[in-house]
Amino acid sequence: MPALIQPRTPPGTLELLPREQMVFQHMQDVIRRGFERFGFVPVETPVFEFKDILLTKSGGETEKQVYFVQSTGAIKEGHEAELALRFDLTVPLARYVAEHEHQLAFPFRRYQIQRVYRGERAQKGRFREFYQCDIDVIGKDKLGIGYDAEIPAIIVQIFEELKIGDFTIHFSNRKILRGFLEMRGEADSGKQQLVLREIDKLDKIGKDKVREAVAALGLAPDCIDQLIELVSFKGTNEQIIQKLNELTTASEGLLREGFTELRHVADALKTLGVPENRARINLAIARGLDYYTGTVYETLIDDHPEFGSVCSGGRYDDLASLYTKSKLPGVGISIGLTRLYDQLTAHKLLPEQKEKTTAQVMIALLDMQPGEETQEALYLGTKLRHAGFNVENYWEQGKLDKKFKYADRVGVPFVIIVGPEELKAGIVKIKNMTTKEQFEVPHDKLVEKLRALAPSRP
Amino acid sequence: MPALIQPRTPPGTLELLPREQMVFQHMQDVIRRGFERFGFVPVETPVFEFKDILLTKSGGETEKQVYFVQSTGAIKEGHEAELALRFDLTVPLARYVAEHEHQLAFPFRRYQIQRVYRGERAQKGRFREFYQCDIDVIGKDKLGIGYDAEIPAIIVQIFEELKIGDFTIHFSNRKILRGFLEMRGEADSGKQQLVLREIDKLDKIGKDKVREAVAALGLAPDCIDQLIELVSFKGTNEQIIQKLNELTTASEGLLREGFTELRHVADALKTLGVPENRARINLAIARGLDYYTGTVYETLIDDHPEFGSVCSGGRYDDLASLYTKSKLPGVGISIGLTRLYDQLTAHKLLPEQKEKTTAQVMIALLDMQPGEETQEALYLGTKLRHAGFNVENYWEQGKLDKKFKYADRVGVPFVIIVGPEELKAGIVKIKNMTTKEQFEVPHDKLVEKLRALAPSRP
């Protein structure tokens, strides 16, 4: 007999036990329902893409983390890998929209909930395989700024339904900082990007370090002072708008444009009924990615800023310029579900899950040989399923005690027993596995009784 | 400006437009609900497994079709690939159960709906990436035969809910043919497997070719005659049981064991209320895979036998002997969803999908600047969402005609307009995009009116 192979999962993956998987799926379901409630339509793309499509966005860090895919045959023939696993859902979206452009209606509102892959160095909290839940609205040639306000409104509704405690979507507009630099004579967009990347670290590394880093980029001391003052300014959305208004009255350029957009988003959020403690202007939010050109979002769990942003995104000028001549501006956001789930469970921040299994009722079949009692019990199970209950049949032979033990272990809350006496009397025995009570119910009261006992049920 | 990269998907993948994806997702939802209704619990495993875990089951065909996965870093360092994409959900299940054995309750009933990967030669109808929807019940040391009957009962319920026309689950028990050969002095199990593989082709290549192939394996002519007669015997389940009973009365071995199991499954199916035209004994079903040791299933669409089996599985003695010393017998079945969807749509066998988008209502926002009308319209949208409708906001500026054109293109059935007059009068205008009618409704009748217009809706 050959030695056993040790059963194990690759590092950087999150594999769950069924009861945990049920929690994860519940979160996924809430997110999907939330997206659909605002009329987003589903898209799924293949897990792998052609290499030339995937590896165009940036040369550096990303390319080092890509997983290449190759079949046995191709390896034997000495071919280089043609395919690679997607590392986000944005590149596949760009390819998708360019490929199917003429079959889509614009603004195109799609959601996509799939796993992505990054060959990260293995360490705690870093995943090589993780779910992203993305929504994007893509316009053709142009896209109204109202969509920039709708995106956080959707996230607020979903996160509230997930009951994960207080959270805040921080938002800003990249045009404001870039416009500010422009106004101060720093017109080089490459340099602007570098400054923004440093500013983005403000909440993590503090003012002094950012000041140092920005100075090293050659910004004038008084420009730095003003910049740091601006991005550290705290206040209500109205107060920040006020401050920006004062700063921008003289300006006609990018700064004013960014201000107008930001004010519009803040106003529309009010109109959408989003409370201010859920969506706050934070001028230090700049996002590391130069890909974003206007509104940007990050989401923090209020009591756990150390989680980092659990849901980020923003506005971009052109989704798919590498694949199509059409100009496709868009705005989107992404929930990093695997990491979020992992952090929330590690800190016990998810609402307690009552259900341990999908079944609400177990039918304990008394007899291995199909007889009248088995038939009756199975019939009652079918009836309960029609009424919306999930019902498990337990077919193993043995003593009733063993069946109850199984029900306990699995976590099914009610067990139904039909023995010869019950059959004759037209009743069933129900055992409530939580209270250990056992009682009898006539057939025609069964559905009603179970509904009363488990009121959250169908 | 660099040349455009042609946006394209790798061959052998099925990428759908949103309205097609909605149909696909509906099928997936029905399948998942069907599994949960019988108390199966969800499992998801990583898309890749360690190579030594994945490539143990069989050396031949499978290994040639495996996709290996390697990060850029590992390739540069000249390492051989350590990971490979799963080619089915059975090997990951075996690894999962062995790895988490002590945290699971047995019989362990899991469902898994995920994609699998095979580096097949590209040709029509062959997929390199496809969904499998699997259920399995795994016992510890033993597993009651009742589960073998429950599996097809679940599939019948799901396929009926999918409304894909008439279908039949053909089932048999591999012990019967192996036991028959044993009785005829062919005790070598390797030879038995070879004979079963030929028998399995009966419905495809016909009696004569099977006879030839079996003769080439060295079976005696009268044994061949009896065998062919047995597997070609057509009749009701009762008639086949009858015939087998006559054949097996004298026998005490494997043949009798297989017969007893088969009869039990047929009886339990009756008890479960499965009509005979949905689940028929067919002794020619042997499955190519030696992995199966008892009950075996194949499912055919009655009017399209050329689709091949769309849902197959069976009973196995030991799930995970490569990874654990525990004996884990099980029974399971798998729906090949991607191929099934592809075949059904190619033949227009899926029920017509009325919804083209997820939204049932579109709010046409008249004013780009948030004003009272916008606020009112957005408020009504929120109210409708609370009532269970999916509601899309259309934020683009422009004439009303353009908004209607968009609604038409996207396929949203109702558009709501709130202008200054409507605001004053406390009413909204609704346009029915199907009939092109337009009418007015007071705010407090809106939900009721829309429910009446779209009765299938919430």
Image (cartoon, coloured by chain):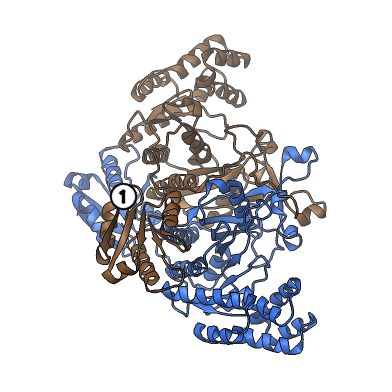
Chain colours: A brown, B blue
What is the x, y in percent for residue B99?
61, 47
Of residue B87 and residue A376, the one placed in the foreground of this image is A376
User: In the rendered structure, which amino acid carries the disc numbered 1?
Assistant: Ser
For mark 1, name the chain. A
Residue B301 in view of the camera: no
Q: Quadrant of residue B433?
A: bottom left
What is the x, y in percent for residue B255?
63, 78
Of residue A161 and residue B256, the one placed in the foreground of this image is B256
- What residue is disc 1 on? A456
* Quarter of the image where the N terminus of chain B is located: top right
Residue B199 in view of the camera: yes
Q: Residue at x 77, y 86 (%)?
A: B220
In the rendered image of this protein, does residue B296 appear above or below residue B388? Answer: below
In the rendered image of this protein, does residue A224 appear above or below residue B76? Answer: above
Of residue A190 and residue B222, the one placed in the foreground of this image is B222
Question: Horizontal placement of B431 versus A283: left or right?
Answer: left
In the rendered image of this protein, does residue B455 appear above or below residue A146? Answer: below
What is the x, y in percent for residue B285?
61, 76
